[in-house]
Amino acid sequence: MRIACLGGGPAGLYLAISMKLRDPAHVVDLFERNRPDDTFGWGVVFSDQTVENLMANDPVSAAVIAQEFAHWDDIDVHIGGETIRSSGHGFIGIGRKRLLNILQGRARELGVTLNFEHEASADLADWAGYDLVIAADGANSRIRDRYEPHFGVDIEVRRNKFFWFGTHKVFEAFTFAFERTPAGWIWAHAYRFDDDLSTFIVEMDPETWVGLGFDAMDQPEAIALCERIFAKYLDGNALISNATHLPGPQAWLNFRRIKCDIWSHENLVLLGDAAHTAHFSIGSGTKLALEDAIKLAEVLNRPGLTREAALAEYQAERNLEVLKLQNSARNSTEWFETLDRYLHFEPIQFAYSLLTRSQRVSHENLRLRDKEWLEGVERWFQSQAVGTEVNEPAPPMFAPLRLRGLELVNRVVVSPMATYSAVDGTPNDFHLVHYGARAQGGAGLLYTEMTCVSAEGRITPGCTGLYASEHVAAWRRIVDFVHANSSAKFCLQLGHSGSKGSTKVGWEGYDVPLDGGNWPLIAASDVPWSADNQVPRPMSRADMDAVIAQFVAAVRLGLEAGFDMIELHAAHGYLLSSFITPLTNKRTDEHGGSLENRLRFPLEVFRAMRAAWPDQRPMSVRISATDWMGELGITPDEAVEIGRAFWAAGADLIDVSAGQTWADCQPVYGRMFQTPFADQVRNEGRVTTMAVGNIYEPDHVNSILAAGRADLVALARPHLIDPSWTLRAAAAQDYRRVAVPAPYLGGMAQLARNLAREAELKA
Ligand SMILES: Cc1cc2nc3c(=O)[nH]c(=O)nc-3n(C[C@H](O)[C@H](O)[C@H](O)COP(=O)(O)OP(=O)(O)OC[C@H]3O[C@@H](n4cnc5c(N)ncnc54)[C@H](O)[C@@H]3O)c2cc1C
Ligand SMILES: Cc1cc2nc3c(=O)[nH]c(=O)nc-3n(C[C@H](O)[C@H](O)[C@H](O)COP(=O)(O)O)c2cc1C
């Protein structure tokens, strides 16, 4: 096969090597515009896994690379005059120039023709003599851009500015240094990559960049300012630029996230940064480039595989890896772009948040890396929670939380879940057993299902209600059981179905209208949930007053029933949510239009409820933090405003859910997929939040809490099949101080022993 490699970065060189290794008869010509020793950038970092992959592919070059690696274990986070050091992170670094020189040598040795100072043509016609043309010409690939429509290129220019410096200061640890300037925060990512050189990337948001005057500074001035700002870390060493040919402001870059739907066109194949990029803050671009090269060489040389099949397999396998990594990279990029959210954290929590920012590193990963440090975080977390110094580490999920006069024994919550098992709104034995079992299962807080404030406010005929005396008595029985037999507190979720009412019970079809006996619906506007659902009547002022009175009456009945807390359901497209989202609120009066107007009625309801509920008892509000409809609907930025508005009206907790407000919305599902919204509402709005949504492992819960992404964590579906989720989590973490119903103590002890034995065997 005759192959032209356009670009002599890690991707191009390693593909050339990998092809020749598999078949020396291949002719590989590589074209690089620079000289062999010219390179942008300084050092790159790898993981142990990447080294193993390199070893398996080409032990000869891998052995040379491995000899040159700088290893380090520690990460130092400098913030607010403190240094937080954690260990066990296991990084390997090498100079980019050194890596390229090693790969160039190996390529030559294997018979690759290396053409330096050769600007490669972006016209496929000029490569007619080759079977395959490899676009390994980096993120700004000219040939990819020339044939752009065939690749479905998606480029996102991120907002922060960065400059990739080198320095002779040798950092002992991977260093993150955050400095406050009069114009805003500026920070450095620094790591050593050989005996006397370190990478030093300086980053900041664009406002700070302009505020500090970098937009009008030449390079020497910009470098001098960075050296002054980071003087205490540099010990007199200079910052060195290898982009000196560029005017000052242009030497600062904005990261470009690139992805492509299709990775090949005719005989042109994208490789490395030409196909995709991963943010420098997770340092995996070179790894991806090298692993692309290994896979491409492998499929192209597999006997019996056509070129089309080979390229299809290459794209399918590599794209999956890339998407996973880009997902983590996006989390990490966003963390640095929204740094302001976390600057009020104490340094230890700030460092934890930084270390877990990509969501690839969790609480238990940190324990494996540095148990002592993690236990320090756990002690700190518990001390904050109880308000006095605690010496015993404990999982964050088992820290108490106080909301007004209510003390929760831990941070695990049974999320509200409709059981559709009531008759005429009255809960029965099913509910007694259902809630009783979950209360005894160890969660600190238990929510009722959405309990409706009127018969017409029910979603289905099976929904519970709180609008008649028989409802109060039935709920009282359940609340009393919960209080007498568990340490769980019980929160009553009150709601009105609005345009999503008069439908079948969940298992007969979600949001499907009843076959008969439908009741009329009300909502903000005459927007039906779907073409199959009834058109609701837009609410008049009289309707609003009536609904407020129903909510207030239900609050009073909830008090009689003995509930500890009340939540107003203002999410998921139900009545109050239909006012908040612009997708369903088409009103032209003072309840439509601006967010302030759309919140007017839900806030009126909330304030009236608050006034009827004892001061010492807390209240929460469930919101949909996004409609998953982009700018057409509620955005997470608006969710911060919504959270703040309810907080100002007396809410003690914002329960941050998302979506279910528009039938055709496009949610992006995944592990903990709604937690970023709880994080944003909490840390931008400075309110207490609860996270919910595909959180199912104790490790998720601990990570969310310790990172300050939420104050409580709710699990819904996991509790459907495992009422004792919290007890199981306690046993798995060998946490003994959880409240276990006395008759279950033996089971708990045995579970803990078995899980410990299993963990030992696994280790
Ligand atoms: C600030 C920063 C820090 C980074 N840190 C890390 C890190 O720690 N770890 C990590 O793994 N990755 C890191 N990366 C990413 C890493 O540099 C890239 O992912 C990696 O270099 C991709 O390799 P590549 O061969 O695909 O592209 P490149 O390394 O960009 O190589 C492309 C080559 O093509 C050449 N070229 C371009 N156009 C032409 C043309 N028309 N004709 C001839 N030659 C051409 C270029 O000169 C270049 O040599 C970082 C990137 C940045 C910006
Ligand atoms: C069967 C079922 C019923 C639900 N009923 C309600 C409800 O009554 N009120 C509410 O706010 N959310 C309700 N939800 C949403 C959950 O509280 C939770 O937000 C959602 O299921 C995501 O959490 P999970 O991934 O842990 O299940 C329900 C979810 C399920 C699965």
Image (cartoon, rainbow, N blue to C red):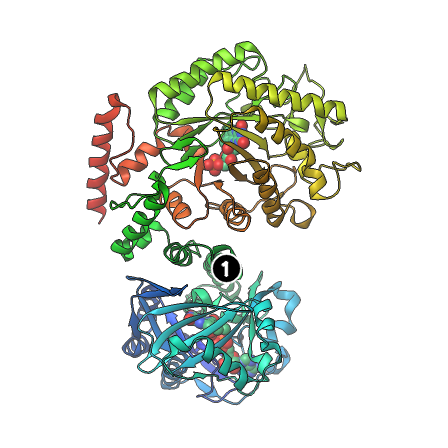
Residue drawn at 70 percent across, 21 percent down? 546
92 vs 507, nearest the viewer? 92
Q: Is residue 286 visible?
A: no
Badge 1 local density, few (<14 within 10 Å), some, or many (20+)?
some
Which residue ends up furthest to the top in the rendered image?
Answer: 470
Q: Is residue 89 visible?
A: yes
Position of 512 relative to 666 (above/below):
above
Residue drawn at 46 percent across, 19 percent down? 562
Q: In the image, 502: left or right of 755?
A: right
Query: What's under tag 1, amino acid-wise?
Result: Leu
Residue 646 in percent (x, y) is at 59, 38
Q: In the image, 328: left or right of 127?
A: left
69 vs 291, nearest the viewer? 69
Residue drawn at 52 percent across, 66 percent down? 276
Quadrant in which residue 89 is drawn: bottom left
Position of 70 relative to 639 (above/below):
below
Position of 126 relative to 506 (above/below):
below
Quadrant in which residue 82 is drawn: bottom left
Q: In the image, 666: left or right of 321?
A: right
Residue drawn at 51 percent across, 19 percent down? 559
Residue 749 in percent (x, y) is at 21, 31
Residue 99 in percent (x, y) is at 38, 79
Position of 513 relative to 240 (above/below):
above
Which residue ends up furthest to the right in the rendered image?
Answer: 588
229 vs 471, nearest the viewer? 229
Residue 129 in percent (x, y) is at 56, 82
Residue corresponding to mark 1: 339
Which element is circle 1 on? helix
Q: In the image, 115: left or right of 452?
A: left
